[in-house]
Image (spheres, helix red, strand yellow):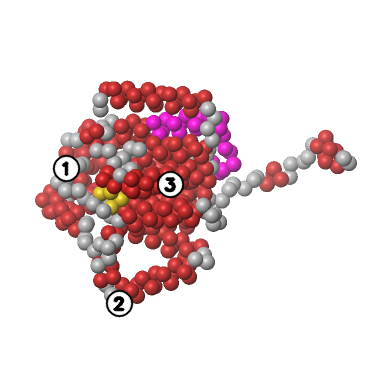
Amino acid sequence: MDSGIAWEIVLAGTVVLFLFSVLRIPATPMIAISIVLVLCSSTYVERSTNTGFSEVVRVASVLVLARFIWSAASQDRSEDPALADRCGQFVRVLAATIVAYLAFATIGHGMYQELLLYSAGAVLTVVYGSLIARRISGPQIRAGILIALVLAISGSVVFGIVRAGDGILGERLRGLVSSPNLLGFYAVMIFALLLSYRTFRLWMLPVGAVTGAALIWTASRSSLIATVLLVTAHLALRQSRLRALWILLGATGLVLLLSNPAWMTDSDLTILRSNNSRHDSYAYTMTVLADTGWQGIGLGNELVQVASTPLRALVHAGLAGGLLVAAMYAVILYFSAKVGRQTLLFGGVMVVHSLSEGWLLSPVGPMTMCFVAVWCALAKCEAPPPSLPRHTARTPMPAATRERSYAVV
């Protein structure tokens, strides 16, 4: 990075942190600012001109949130402390499995510097997830994440329309972020947060419409499958009035597909393309495993991009990498099941999504950090509020208070 640009970033960060230390910013906008910084770590700007910036904004997102946690504005004692501990434990155990995978993918290949750097990223994610879950209510976390993600989605749609040369990649919308699949991932997060609300709000209509349009435009089939699974299972669990309409639409689409398969293959929508884009990843993985004797070739040494969490782990760390990915899935499902059905549904859908995308192996990537934040928000929103101890209800009223309560005004 150019020294002048680096100095400007440091100066701007110092000013922002100073303002945050003086101003009393509420929890929701503070969470939104922190998530926006995380999203800024992967933009459409080429990496050659963006060196160092992604690391700076990730650290800044943690510092901003830490500064808020230490302030008086974050003193929210209305939630069960055990729930915050559970969220923190989930982040720590998940990060530990990722670090174990990194160890198998680096140590045997002499990549000690990579192990230190990525392990530091895992520590950063642990701190970030712990801060997210500490003394901030679930609705505030959820609202802040929604604001940040909606800004990213809507800004990407506008950017794709205004500057199609930069915002559209091969007829697929990538907008302000680095790839269409990343933007599709953000769309899945928005739908998961919207479905966590117990009652319908009018503002959900435009948000859902813009997000759905962006998802279709990204042509991310893995994100579309995750969204359909999420909505279908949610309606089935909630027994919503929309369940019948959703089933009718699904049945209609299935009938059209079975009666005329060309309905999808001949469609002009890029998201309905029928090519197998993951075939090269699978074939390359099998070749690596056959040549390396299930030892892997090391972190980042693949010749082609392997777009799948389990396949990429097998390429990097061999059989041990595949087993550790299974451990990651077990951690997500186990802790999600301990919270409730909706959190378990979200965790299961994200496991399915990671079968086609490799985001789970990067502890400090924007997708992993965003997943951790959304998981904590959904868990804290689903968990029931702590009940008051019984002895507090039987606390005798002071005599002076009792006299005032019976006084005639």
Residue 367: mark = none
Mark 1 or 2, closer to the camera: 2
In the picture shown, does residue 144 fall above or below 56?
below
In this view, the residue in front, 285 or 156, is 156
- Residue 165 in view here: yes
Q: Position of residue 367 (x, y in %)?
A: 34, 45
Tag 2: amino acid = Ser
Q: Would you say the magenta stretch is mainly helix, strand or loop?
A: helix
Residue drawn at 17 percent across, 53 percent down: 285
Mark 3 or 1, closer to the camera: 3
Q: CA distance from mark 3 to mark 1?
A: 35 Å
Question: Along the polypeptide, which appears first: circle 2 or circle 3?
Answer: 3
Residue drawn at 83 percent across, 41 percent down: 405
Q: CA distance from mark 1 to mark 2?
A: 45 Å
Left or right, 351 with reference to 89: left
Question: Along the polypeptide, which appears first: circle 1 or circle 2?
Answer: 2
Q: Position of residue 283 (x, y in %)?
A: 16, 56
Q: Which residue is mark 3?
A: 150
In the picture shown, does residue 204 fall above or below 37?
below
Q: Residue furthest left?
A: 291
As helix, strand or loop, the secondary structure at mark 1 comes to: loop
Left or right, 240 with reference to 263: right
Residue drawn at 54 percent across, 55 percent down: 202
Q: Which residue is mark 2?
A: 259
In the picture shown, does residue 192 fall above or below 7?
below
As helix, strand or loop, the secondary structure at mark 3 comes to: helix
Residue 301: mark = 1
Question: Along the polypeptide, which appears first: circle 3 or circle 1?
Answer: 3
Q: CA distance from mark 2 to mark 3?
A: 38 Å
